[in-house]
Image: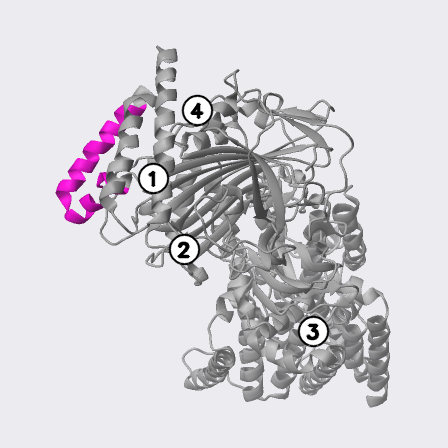
């Protein structure tokens, strides 16, 4: 039965993909004309999909959703307009995997899944209950909390920029969440609190530990990446949990958000036992409003799920410079996700034009060039929607075999690191070192630091030095912490001279906390989230500022405003800081002993206040008293 | 008498100037015994830096000085060392003059009593001769200026020295009989650190005694003067607070200064009793014990005023000592102020028991503070209990010494 269905689905995939290609070409060429035709064209794949390729429970769900839609249609004309088949059918799903062999012998694999949802549910009075490809759980969250943009990432391990270059989408160790709310929201903090709790449930993560004590509102570092140029940072919330540990329980709900789940397409590679046996693992969800086409006539919601993983040469690769999909993921690719309009695997062969560095098999005639992170890269492309990609074995197992030693990698132009200096548990100093490796261009960077309240920063000790000279930041935004309410936020705009190292230092004092405020392992230390360095780095080649639908996903995440520079965000290491601890075993003793001293004070004052002084007549010795007794009888004067 | 005092001032200033220039200054200004979150110089500088950045210094939890302090140091921040040395000098001179005045009063009373033959014959050896009283003011000034606690406090540039100066001037004005200045200075001291509020009662008692008004609730003259003095005090307090509001344009400083003093949110170790107690406190008892401990500071005023209404100057001393023992963020600068008064009660020493023991305890504790701090914070071979034990013992010693003196008045 399963085989039958599989075969059937393959046929449908073919039909579907050809039609989808057709329709997307259409929309590119004549964007505004003749919706009639598009309706009929794009209607077909929808029916095809719901017929066969999806599992039975999906069908049931879909049926449920369509009754929802019918109900809504009766509600109002506006809603029903949005839910006509034409509108719903413009939802789109793309998946892609980029493999970049690193010079260290490690391998970097980056998955991106993009779901476009053609609706504008933040409009006044519109209720959306029809979900096709977009996950309903997220859609409801977005509309309930009036979220404009949401970025969440879970990362295990630290991205080594100096060894591996820049990642496509950077993320700090632990969990990071930043959200732009719609400017109609009145109680942003309330929404934020509820949102973090809901997301915590959706992703099985400890996001509920995000509260006001680790939330900041950066004024310049985090601009919206989607449509609309909101600048009022009152609607932005940013929080990191550097201690968050990412594991299978976070991956499973993340995979469930994909239209095909982990059953088909690239997502079959995402087996947790391999993914977490790596030196770096990062999964993220980015939701933002984007333009549907070049003229931006209609808006759509984009859900971008990314997963980046770096497999280590020695632990995962057993020291052999030989990688294959099977070795990395213990799976091979057999099909694209049937719902995807495009499904591609890119292998970075820029450093290997003649095949002298490594050998890639099977060979592919398709090549693609993209300008990404200020560099023109060449990729071999494997299009999974084509049957010939899979060859006769009906499976694709990419093989990369290194021939010699890897050459020198181009040093990343921007790089940052951070550490704590000082000894003892009283004070310390945070050092942030930012490197500009550009040979002749200076450029400004925005440095953002969010430090928990129990490290009291002294902003007057802030020094910024480049090339052993004072480098005064041209913009400083500092918000001091409030004990138990708010962390420190420090944002600076620093001009980095060419080919230089800039050091930012600031002193802090460690607070003694209440004994209930320590973590269960207090002597492990407290984490301080990564600093964020955001910059427009001068590009070596002209960046592509044109917006096109068919750009590879990895090169189209951050909008490019000008040709001469590209946006980079670098996260430094999180810090682990020890705090002085009280003795947790003796609250009773302390209460008793302190109260004793107070009572001694009280007692002695009480004594002073109530004591009266009287002249005390000294009593006579016994012999004199006896003598007096006799004298009294004799009637002679008494002795004194 | 002026020559020895001048000499003393020169010696004191020299010691401070040398220490300011030495590498010790940095070390001393970090000591938790010398500076507290309320009066650390580092935090004053931080407050000024925040002001320069356009951020209200009270928006964070680092700065807890009053608005007057910001404006004072806004102008003299570059001459801070001189300001602190001068302040110490002023305090010492004020104490010198106050004790001189006090001694004159005591001596006059004693003379009247002698003339009217009120002393029993066997008490004559207890009478105080002008010769032995002659050097007491100088000793007081010396106890203040050359006390290591004062020197440390000054070298650390703790603003505690300024508060001490205000209190010393208040005592001087009170003993000189100027109710107006005394009320204003008391209001200023209260504004600075709230606790000197309890000095209202002894000051009032002193004025009543000086004007021969009996403390009698049915006498209109008593009420007239009490209300007059209270009006001066409350009026100047309102004016000072209002002025601070106009300086900053917000009331933020009220929770940030007085809320901080009362609710004890910062548990940085110091020589007091609060920090470890509230670090180890069970959460649901916290409010109760904060109330108990704060009431404890103010509570002694009433019974002590009743008991010591004949000795208002001694009552002032007692109140200052109680404040410095039981306040929420005490430093050695506070201890130094009440210790300066000890020579004034030197005629009591012959009655004191255990004086050797108590002074040994205080000396040993002062030496052990840095040692145990080092073992806990830097060496890691001790834990917080060691430092806590020393604070307990130090406070116990202070309570005992106060007790000894008060019993024989």
The image position of residue B398, as x and y in percent, is 70, 59
- Using the rendered image, report if marks 1 and 4 lie on a common chain: yes
Front position among marks 1 and 3: 1
Front position among marks 2 and 1: 1
Q: Which residue shows up at 48% across the image and 54% down it?
A: A546
Q: What is the distance, in whole Å, between disc 1 and disc 4 at their CAs?
A: 23 Å
The residue under label 3 is B161
Q: Is residue B350 above or below residue A552?
A: below
The front one of B386 and B4 is: B386
The image position of residue B112, as x and y in percent, is 67, 87
Q: What is the distance, in whole Å, between disc 2 and disc 1 at their CAs?
A: 24 Å
The residue under label 4 is A264
Q: What is the distance, in whole Å, between disc 3 and disc 4 at their CAs?
A: 75 Å
The chain identifier of the residue carrying mark 1 reads A
Check disc 2 and report its element: helix, strand or loop: loop
- Mark with earlier residue (1, 4): 1
Q: Main secondary structure of the magenta part?
A: helix
Whether label 2 touches label 4, CB < 8 Å = no
The residue under label 2 is A227
- Using the rendered image, report if marks 2 and 4 lie on a common chain: yes
Mark 4 crowdedness (10 Å alpha carbons): few <14, some 14-19, many ≥20: some
Can you say which quadrant of the picture contains the N terminus of chain A?
top left
Mark 1 crowdedness (10 Å alpha carbons): few <14, some 14-19, many ≥20: some
Residue A41 position by quadrant? top left
Q: What is the distance, in whole Å, between disc 3 and disc 2 at their CAs?
A: 58 Å
The front one of A403 and A140 is: A403
Which segment is the magenta one?
A58-87
């Amino acid at each position: 039965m399963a085989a039958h269905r599989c075969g059937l689905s393959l046929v449908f995939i073919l039909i579907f993909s050809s039609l989808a290609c057709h329709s997307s070409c259409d929309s590119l060429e004549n964007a505004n004309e003749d919706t009639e035709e598009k309706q009929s064209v794009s209607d077909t794949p929808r029916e095809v999909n719901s017929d066969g390729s999806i599992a039975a429970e999906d069908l049931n769900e879909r049926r449920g959703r369509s009754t929802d839609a019918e109900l809504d249609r009766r509600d109002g004309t506006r809603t029903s307009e949005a839910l006509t088949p034409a509108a719903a059918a413009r939802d789109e799903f793309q998946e892609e995997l980029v493999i970049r062999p690193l010079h260290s012998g490690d391998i970097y694999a980056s998955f991106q899944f993009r779901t476009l949802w053609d609706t504008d549910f933040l409009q006044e009075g519109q209720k959306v209950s029809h979900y096709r490809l977009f996950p309903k759980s997220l859609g409801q969250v977005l509309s309930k909390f009036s979220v404009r943009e949401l970025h969440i990432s879970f990362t295990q391990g630290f991205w080594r920029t100096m060894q591996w270059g820049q990642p496509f989408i950077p993320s700090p160790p632990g969990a990071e969440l930043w959200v732009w709310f719609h400017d109609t929201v009145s109680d942003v903090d309330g929404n934020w609190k509820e949102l973090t709790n809901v997301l915590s449930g959706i992703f099985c993560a400890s996001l509920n530990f995000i509260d006001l004590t680790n939330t900041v509102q950066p004024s310049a570092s985090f601009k919206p990446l989607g449509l609309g140029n909101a600048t009022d940072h009152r609607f932005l919330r940013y929080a990191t949990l550097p201690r968050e540990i990412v594991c299978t329980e976070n991956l499973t709900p993340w995979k469930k958000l994909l239209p095909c789940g982990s059953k088909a397409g690239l997502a079959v590679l995402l087996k947790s036992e391999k993914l977490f046996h790596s030196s770096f693992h990062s999964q993220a969800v980015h939701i933002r409003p984007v333009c549907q086409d070049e003229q931006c006539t209609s808006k759509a919601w984009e859900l971008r799920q990314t997963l980046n993983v770096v497999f280590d040469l020695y632990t995962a690769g057993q020291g052999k410079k030989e990688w294959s999909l099977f070795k990395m993921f213990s799976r091979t690719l057999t099909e694209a996700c049937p719902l995807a309009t495009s499904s591609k695997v890119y292998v970075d062969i820029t450093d290997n034009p003649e095949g002298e560095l490594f050998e890639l098999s099977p060979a592919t005639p398709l090549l693609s060039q993209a300008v990404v992170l200020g560099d023109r890269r060449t990729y071999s492309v494997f299009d999974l929607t084509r049957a010939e990609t899979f060859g006769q074995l009906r499976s694709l197992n990419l093989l990369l075999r290194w021939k010699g030693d890897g050459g020198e990698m181009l040093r990343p132009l921007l790089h940052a690191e951070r550490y704590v200096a000082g000894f003892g548990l009283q004070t310390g100093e945070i050092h942030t070192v930012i490197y500009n490796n550009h040979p002749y261009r200076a450029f400004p960077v925005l440095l953002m630091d969010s430090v928990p309240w129990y490290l009291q920063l002294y902003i007057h000790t802030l020094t910024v030095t480049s090339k052993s000279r004072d480098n005064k930041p041209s913009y400083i935004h500092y918000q001091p912490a409030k004990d138990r309410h708010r962390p420190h936020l420090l944002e600076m705009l620093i001009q980095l001279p060419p080919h230089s190292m800039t050091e930012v230092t600031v002193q802090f004092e460690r607070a003694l906390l209440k004994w209930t405020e320590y973590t269960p392992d207090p002597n492990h230390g407290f984490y301080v989230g990564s600093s964020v360095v955001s910059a427009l780095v001068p590009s070596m080649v002209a960046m592509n500022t044109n917006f096109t639908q068919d750009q590879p996903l990895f090169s189209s995440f951050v909008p490019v405003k000008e040709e001469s520079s590209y946006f980079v965000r670098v996260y430094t290491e999180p810090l682990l800081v020890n705090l002085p601890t009280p003795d947790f075993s003796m609250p009773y003793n302390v209460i008793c002993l302190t109260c004793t001293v107070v009572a001694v004070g009280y007692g002695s004052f009480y004594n002073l206040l109530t004591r009266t002084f009287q002249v005390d007549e000294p009593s006579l010795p016994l012999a004199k008293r006896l003598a007096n007794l006799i004298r009294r009888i004799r009637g002679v004067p008494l002795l004194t | 008498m002026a020559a020895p005092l001048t000499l003393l001032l020169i010696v004191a200033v020299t010691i401070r100037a040398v220490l300011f220039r030495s590498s010790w200054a940095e070390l001393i200004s970090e000591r938790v015994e010398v500076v507290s979150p309320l009066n650390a110089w580092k935090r004053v500088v931080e407050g000024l830096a925040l002001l320069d950045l356009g951020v209200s210094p009270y928006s964070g939890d680092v700065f807890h000085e009053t608005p007057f302090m910001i404006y004072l140091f806004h102008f003299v921040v570059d001459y801070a060392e001189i300001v602190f040395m001068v302040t110490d000098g002023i305090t010492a001179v004020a104490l010198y003059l106050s004790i001189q005045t006090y001694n004159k009063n005591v001596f006059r009373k004693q003379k009247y009593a002698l003339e009217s033959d009120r002393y029993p014959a066997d008490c004559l050896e207890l009478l105080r001769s002008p010769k032995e009283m002659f050097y007491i003011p100088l000793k007081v000034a010396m106890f203040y200026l050359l006390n290591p606690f004062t020197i440390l406090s000054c070298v650390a540039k703790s603003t505690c020295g300024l508060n001490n100066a205000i209190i010393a001037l208040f005592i001087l004005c009170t003993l000189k009989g100027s109710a107006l200045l005394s009320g204003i200075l008391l209001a200023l001291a209260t504004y600075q650190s709230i606790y000197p509020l309890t000095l209202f009662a002894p000051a009032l008692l002193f004025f009543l005694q000086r004007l021969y008004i009996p403390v009698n609730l049915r006498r209109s003259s008593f009420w007239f003067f009490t209300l007059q003095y209270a009006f001066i005090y409350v009026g100047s307090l309102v004016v000072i607070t209002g002025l601070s509001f106009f300086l900053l344009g917000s009331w933020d400083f009220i929770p940030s200064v007085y809320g901080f003093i009362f609710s004890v949110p910062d548990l940085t170790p110091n020589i007091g009793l609060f920090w470890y107690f509230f670090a180890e406190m069970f959460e649901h008892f916290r409010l109760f014990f904060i109330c108990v401990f704060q009431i404890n500071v103010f509570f002694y005023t009433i019974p002590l005023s009743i008991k010591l209404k004949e000795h208002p100057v001694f009552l002032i001393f007692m109140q200052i000592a109680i404040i410095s023992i039981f306040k929420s963020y005490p430093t050695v600068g506070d201890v130094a102020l009440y210790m300066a008064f000890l020579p004034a009660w030197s005629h009591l020493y012959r009655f004191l028991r255990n004086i050797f023991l108590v002074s040994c305890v205080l000396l040993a504790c002062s030496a052990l503070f840095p040692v145990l701090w080092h073992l806990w914070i830097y060496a890691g071979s001790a834990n917080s209990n060691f430092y806590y034990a020393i604070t307990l013992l130090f406070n116990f010693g202070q309570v005992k010494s106060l007790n000894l003196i008060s019993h024989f008045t």
